[in-house]
Image: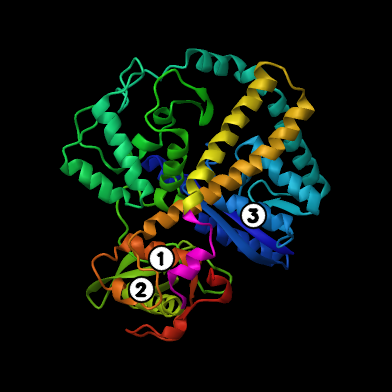
Amino acid sequence: MKAGFYGRQSVLRSKDDERRDLDTSTDRQVTDGFAWVRSQGGEVVRTYRDEGISGYSGALRPEFERLLVDLDERTIDTVVCWKLDRLARNHRDFQRLWDVCERRGARLVSLHEMFDSSTPAGEFTIRMLVGMAKMESDNISVRVKRALEAFRQAGRMHTGGARPFGHHWDGSQVPDEAKVIRWTAEQFIAGRSLNAVTNELAADGVAGTKGKPMGRREVKRMVTSPRVAGLVEHQGEIVGEGTWEPILDRPTWEQVRATMLDPARARQVGRPPKYLLPGFLRCGMEGCGAKLVSRPLTSHGRTKPNYVCIATGRLHLAIAAEPVERLIEERVLDRLDHIGLVKVLAARAKADDTRELAEQLARDDAAFTQLGDDFYQDGIIDRPTFLRQRAALEPRIANARAELARRMQQQELVGVPAMPGKLRPWWATPAATLEKKRAVLALVLDHAVILPAGRPSRTVDSKRVVIPEDGWRL
């Protein structure tokens, strides 16, 4: 058995959510998954984690998409999840997953529901779920036709709560606020951080519609809302164009969304990063492999930053933050000093056609919305035509969004020297912010493994820090 374990934890909304999700954190999910696979004599060859991304919202889940690719390429032959709603919370994603499983003869296992598609009972459960998913799809036109028609015909902005920044209630623009939105979008596309832009807006005295300075969340929401692109949203889906005047054109809005809704950025909302390596370090304890988290620890009366693993519910591995960060920095800089960022970026898509990609994505997304109208609303195409065209558009849109997000990440590298031998001197300057350093690391480093300490020591043994072959992105 070559298993792939998928774990996901949604964005926490309150302290009650935090308590409820404690036992379903991805670290706990992975621990249970590894234990079950070992008990079956198998091996977990890949883990997939989508942190802080809702399964309901329809937002791109990069690791879920990667799982589908690995399953289709036979890198894994078994998909294991802690609970089915961690894996898929809408019938469309579940149907996509099961289609690949059937095509490749793969196995699907849910630990919480205790079903295994390789058994008769498990296959019956899957067939029932697939049947329910198809019935749900068939009933969509009945359930949502009136709601979508009302939204599209009215084409009005939601009138509850405070007035939206940038627009009057009648849909006309507030010129000064619209100017702020356009400037903010330009800054994000140019690679500036959410922190820097929020601070500059506050310094300039820009306030929200309630008269208070906007925080990071408000600034992010201000430019990523479908409303600023003149789009009507219903339950997380774009269902048509509104009757109000858009502030951002659709391609610009897509670029901003790709930048600001990247999961790596989403996890940072609320406070700027204080450590260099969150997300890059894995636990080297046998059978673990969980991501290390940053945490201050007290030793000999002194409190210092550390990276720790608490996947089992208790701390079982720790390493001092500063020494391991220096080691990783040196290894990355040694690698880049010889080739420079020029070669790395040249191997990737050119940034000058990013706008073209955003325009194509906007056209495909509009075509997808129109396709639903043609089938559900107007009845001018039959079901087989609808399903065939949807099957062609969905992966193209998902791939375009993922590619656009990757390209927009490169905008964070503005100001970073690209030529060989220039990066190391720049690394020690104030211009090398923590966010820019993390952006450079993300280009070349997937992960490093921290091995257990052989004996207690106040120094970090460099042999504990291992970057395996699959830990490099180039």
First in sequence: mark 3 vs mark 1:
3
- In the rendered structure, are the residues bearing label 1 and label 2 in contact, judged by CB atoms less than 8 Å apart? yes
Marks 1, 2: nearer the viewer: 2
Residue 25 in sight = no
Q: Is residue 381 left or right of residue 240?
A: right
Residue 104 in sight = yes
Q: Which mark is residue 62?
A: none
- State the SS at label 3: helix
Asked whether 343 or 75 is in front, the reply is 343
Chain part drawn in magenta:
339-351
Q: Which mark is residue 423?
A: 2
Distance (Cα) linking label 2 and label 3: 34 Å
Q: Which mark is residue 440?
A: 1
For label 3, the residue is: 67
Distance (Cα) linking label 3 and label 1: 25 Å
Q: Quadrant of residue 126?
A: top right
Q: Is residue 236 left or right of residue 323?
A: right
Q: How would you classify the magenta stretch by its main secondary structure?
A: helix
Whether 43 is drawn above or below 28: the answer is below
Q: Is residue 353 left or right of residue 274?
A: right
First in sequence: mark 2 vs mark 3:
3
- State the SS at label 2: helix
Instruction: Report the amino acid beneath label 3.
Output: Leu
Q: Residue 192 placed where, x, y %?
A: 32, 52
Instruction: Report the amino acid beneath label 1.
Output: Val
Q: Residues within 10 Å of mark 2 (few under 14, many from 20)?
A: many
Q: Residue 211 placed where, x, y %?
A: 19, 29
Q: Residue 303 placed where, x, y %?
A: 25, 71
Marks 3, 1: nearer the viewer: 1
First in sequence: mark 1 vs mark 2:
2
